[in-house]
Amino acid sequence: LWHACSKMFWRAVVAEFLAMSLFIFISIGSALGYNFPVVGNRTATATQDNVKVSLAFGIAIATMAQSVGHISGAHLNPAVTLGLLLSCQISLLKAFMYIIAQCLGAVVATAILSGVTSSLPNNSLGLNAVTRCLWRCDCGQSFH
């Protein structure tokens, strides 16, 4: 409990919050471009858009891991934090605070994205859903 009062502990918690916020903002923001194409986007196929989104996710997580790895360990995922807790590599207090920071970071980033894209039609923040023509045989694909 003594480390909860240290500057390094709170610096690590804030680093997890900021890294998760930036990761969600960059990665989900890139996925929104797939559902809401930019007017100047000259992409020929949806496959190229998938590659762009995949690269955005990969580069964002790598950048965040390099940026905060030396501060907090760059968990960037409550599941990773839980795994480290269960393997006794971090304390219960640190795990709890990291998970709270990561979840709050994701909520804040999603709220910012929601505000930025609120004027777009059919704004679903990249949510995958079953299409209306799932039960017809002429659709070709069931998810969009």
Image: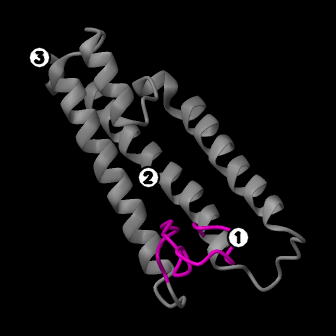
- Residue 124, horizontal then vertical, whole percent: 46, 76
Q: Can residue 61 be seen in this view?
A: yes
Kindly identify the residue that appears in the image at 42 percent across and 70 percent down.
112
Q: Magenta segment range?
A: 123-144
Sequence-first disc among 3 and 2: 3
Q: In this view, does 28 lie above or below 7?
A: below
Instruction: Name the quadrant containing residue 140.
Output: bottom right
Provide the secondary structure element on which disc 2 rests.
Answer: helix
Q: Residue 140 carries which label?
A: 1
Rendering coords of residue 55 (x, y %): 73, 47
Residue topped by disc 2: 21
The residues bearing labels 2 and 1 have C-alpha atoms spaced at a distance of 36 Å
Of the pair 81 and 45, the residue shown nearer to us: 45
Distance, label 1 to label 3, CA atoms, is 59 Å
Give the total of numbered labels: 3
Vertical relation: 79 (above or below) 21: above
Question: Circles 3 and 2: CB distance less than 8 Å?
Answer: no
Q: Nearer the viewer, mark 1 or mark 3?
A: 1
Q: Mark 3 points at which residue?
A: 2
Say which amino acid is labelled 2.
Ser
The quarter of the picture where residue 43 lies is bottom right
